[in-house]
Amino acid sequence: SDMTSLTIDPSIPYFSVDMVMAIMNLPISLYGPIADSILCIETDFFTLDEEVEGKYYFIPQVESCQKLLTSLGFVDSGSN
């Protein structure tokens, strides 16, 4: 939220274990009619003692993605 100057309230994440295309079908179906690309932020988890292997993909709702891209300077605030 420091980079975007936005207040970000996380919700309980969805948890899914499957093949990549099976997991990505939902975001593709939501974003497909609206845009040709989506914002996906990847991160790793670790503690001081151990490293946890796995990935967390942040895929915001369509409206939130527009606000996030605008605040990061990727989209002109006047365009919709």
Image (tube, grey):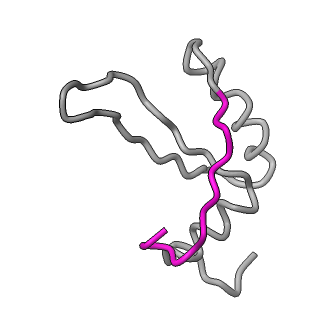
Residue placed most toward the observer, 9 or 65: 9
Which segment did they paint magenta? 1-14
> Residue at 47% of width from left, 47% of height from top?
41
Position of the C terminus by quadrant = bottom right
Q: Please identify the residue farthest to the bottom as the structure is shown.
A: 78
- Horizontal side of 30 relative to 23 (left or right) equals right
Q: Nearer the viewer, residue 79 or 73?
A: 73
- On screen, 14 above or below 74? above
79 lies left or right of 5: right
**Of the pair 79 and 16, the residue shown nearer to us:** 16
Whether the magenta-drawn stretch holds residue 24 is answered as: no
Could you tell me residue 58's position as x and y percent? 55, 44
- Image check: 71 left or right of 65? left
Q: Quadrant of residue 8?
A: bottom right
Please tell me which residue is depicted at 59% across the width and 12% down the height of the picture: 18
Above-or-below relation of 29 to 52: below
Q: In the displayed image of the protein, which residue is found farthest to the front?
A: 49
Residue most toward the top?
A: 18
Question: Where 22 falls versus 30 (above or below)?
Answer: above
Majority secondary structure of the magenta segment? loop
Q: Say above or below: 72 vs 51.
A: below
- At x 60%, y 82%, the residue is 76
- What residue sits 22% from the left and 24% below the top? 50
Q: Residue furthest left?
A: 49
In the rendered image, residue 2 lying in the magenta stretch gets the answer yes
Residue 70 position, x and y percent, is 59, 75
Tag count: 0
